[in-house]
Image: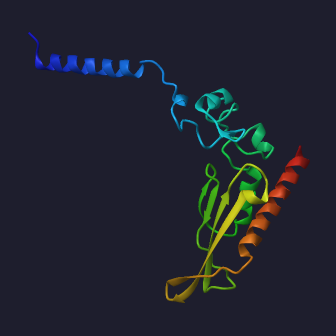
Amino acid sequence: MVTFSSFKSLISGAGVALILAGCSYGTVDYDQFPGSATTDERVNGQAMTRAQEKERGGLFGSEGLNLFGGEDSQKGGGTGIGVNTFLWRATLDTLSFMPLNSADPFGGVIISDWYTPVETPNERFKLTAYILGTALRSDAIKVSVFRQVNVGPNQWQDAVVEEGTVTAMEDAILTRARQLRIDSANAE
């Protein structure tokens, strides 16, 4: 005689077996379907197929994911996570006078908190810096500056940022990054 609990166990076991069997049934060649090529990586102007990505060495390249530095990160080519180490450090150094709200080394985003200069207590600034690549180039850093002016007790209103402020901040970061690269080369 079959009891309800043994019947339930039997059905559960059969369900698990079916699920596992379904997972192991054959392989699918995703490259045969239209649009199966990824759009992020390109080879000779064409999107790479999954087979080409697999041949290249996986999702993170043939060297894998280098989270904790190593030989490549010391050379400034990046830490394996898509961010130039010299630009990252230079941005932190350049914005060190401002309180930081967040810093994401994986995404290459640094966001400051509001900063009020001592000279002008009725205005405050906030910066967001984006590190866009692994190369030490002028187009690998983008800075957004936000400015507010005090219009009453604890009331702030958005204001126009002076022309050239963003460019000056980006130039200061690039100059510091070049100094860090030169210092690194001299240390070797």
Q: Nearer the viewer, residue 142 or 86?
A: 142
Indicate the position of residue 165 as horizontal and vertical percent values: 72, 75
Q: Is residue 12 above or below residue 185?
A: above
User: What is the quadrant of the C terminus in the image?
Assistant: top right
Q: Which residue shows up at 58% across the image and 37% down it? A: 37
- Residue at 16% over, 17% down: 7
Q: Which picture quadrant has residue 117? A: bottom right
Farthest residue toward the left? 1
- Residue 38: quarter of image: top right
x and y percent of residue 55 in the render?
A: 66, 26
Horizontal side of residue 179 vs 111, given as left or right? right
Residue closer to the observer: 18 or 74? 18
**What coloring was used for the rendering?**
rainbow
* Quarter the N terminus occupies: top left
Q: Is residue 134 visible?
A: yes
Residue nearest the viewer, comparing 110 with 41: 41
- Left or right of residue 108, residue 24 in this image: left
Residue shown at the point (73%, 50%) measured from the top left: 84
Going by the image, does 185 lie left or right of 85? right
Residue positioned 70% across, 32% down in the render = 63
Asked whether 132 or 105 is in front, the reply is: 132
